[in-house]
Amino acid sequence: MDPQPIHPELFPHIRIVMGMVIGLGITRLLMGVAGLIQHPNRNKPSTVHLLWVGSILVELVLFWWWEFALFQINSWSFGLFFFLIFYAVTLFLMAALLFPDNITEYAGYEDFFLKRRKWFFGLLAATFVFDSIDTLIKGAEHWERFGPDYFLQVPFGLVLCALGIWSASRRLHIAIPALHIGYQLYWIIKVFNTMT
């Protein structure tokens, strides 16, 4: 089906659907954190786990913010809509992996994370690729806004994901989310000028 000229009500509809998926991810993380506060002895807190919870929470919020640039798109297709929803679902699945329904057969959240890390880092690797496609969809002006440091994120991110899949080293699994959070803060400061 060919892209059609945008109807004034189409973009808000698309944002609502994406927002529902992203909202579910945020809810999952916040409910998980609330559970840790309510029952601190049920599962031992983990630095690896908490760093990823913080990072993915920021990632979900940033995704929601970045997608506002979609208002510039003049034509839509179901394929584009499906891609954006699939991207949002990928982020939700990462949140769900951080707070699974039941971890009784594991030693805690860190043990679960390390044993399911291939899924998590596979999804994270997909988000690096999806982010590049999403930026291209928003047009050349949007793409050029970020500069050469943006183009390093995909290869660097994919290398970190490969290391995360390959190794169960606790030090590495603390370093990767710490780097990811640092990278997120860099973009928040650079693009949004929140610190100036």
Image (spheres, rainbow, N blue to C red):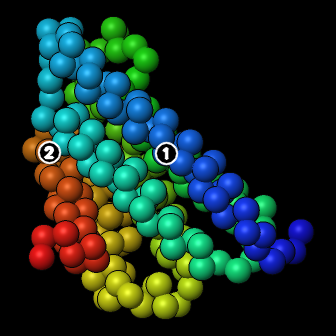
- Closer to the camera: disc 1 or disc 2? 1
Q: Nearer the viewer, residue 85 or 115?
A: 85
Residue 84 located left or right of residue 167: right
First along the sequence among labels 1 and 2 = 1
What whole-number distance in Å separates the C-alpha atoms at marks 1 and 2?
25 Å
Helix, strand or loop under label 2: helix
Residue 126 located left or right of residue 146: right
Disc assigned to residue 138: none
Question: Is the residue under label 2 in contact with that under label 1 (CB below 8 Å)?
Answer: no
Which residue does the image show at 53% across and 90% down from the upper left? 140
Q: Which residue is mark 1?
A: 22
Q: Position of residue 193 (x, y in %)?
A: 21, 75
Give the answer, above or below, for where 52 lies relative to 106: below
Mark 2 is surrounded, within 10 Å at the Cα level, by few (under 14), some (14 to 19) or many (20 or more) other residues, namely some
Q: Give the total number of marks visible in the rendering.
A: 2
Q: Position of residue 86 (x, y in %)?
A: 61, 52
Q: Which residue is mark 2?
A: 174
Q: Nearer the viewer, residue 129 or 164?
A: 129
**Which image quadrant is residue 108 in?**
top left
Which residue does the image show at 34% across and 33% down from the upper left? 29
